[in-house]
Image: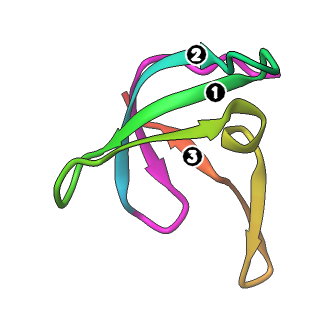
Amino acid sequence: MAEIKAGRYRHFKGMEYEVLFVAKHSETLEEMVVYRALYGDGGVWVRPAKMWNETVERDGKVFPRFEYIG
């Protein structure tokens, strides 16, 4: 799995997020990304790291779900 580093990311739909850290699920030990929205109320979210690194297809093009921007 590709390394997920702290910093700003752009979701393929255009919104920006900040990765705070990568944590482990207490029951399964699955790696989870803890991140916050850089818009709206700045909500904090968690998503499986495996899903974070996925690619998605939209309008016949393939994009990373989240792209590191700094």
Q: Please say if the residues under marks 3 and 2 sit with CB atoms less than 8 Å apart.
A: no
Query: In the image, is 47 to the left or to the right of 56?
Result: left
- Give, as a three-letter code, the residue at label 2: Ala
**Residue 23 circle label:** 2
Magenta residue span: 1-14
Tell which circle, 3 or 2, labels the residue nearer the N-terminal end: 2
Q: Please say if the residues under marks 2 and 1 sit with CB atoms less than 8 Å apart.
A: yes
Q: Image quadrant for the C terminus?
A: top left
- Of helix, strand and loop, which one carries label 1? strand
Residue under label 3, please give it. Answer: 66
3 or 2: mark nearer the eye? 2
**Residue 32 circle label:** 1
- Between marks 3 and 1, how big is the CA–CA gap? 14 Å
The quadrant in which residue 6 appears is top left
Front-most of residues 18 and 30: 30
Q: How is the image coloured?
A: rainbow
Query: In the image, is 40 to the left or to the right of 33?
Result: left
Magenta stretch holds residue 7: yes
Q: Please identify the dominant SS of the magenta region.
A: loop
Q: Position of residue 33 (x, y in %)?
A: 56, 29
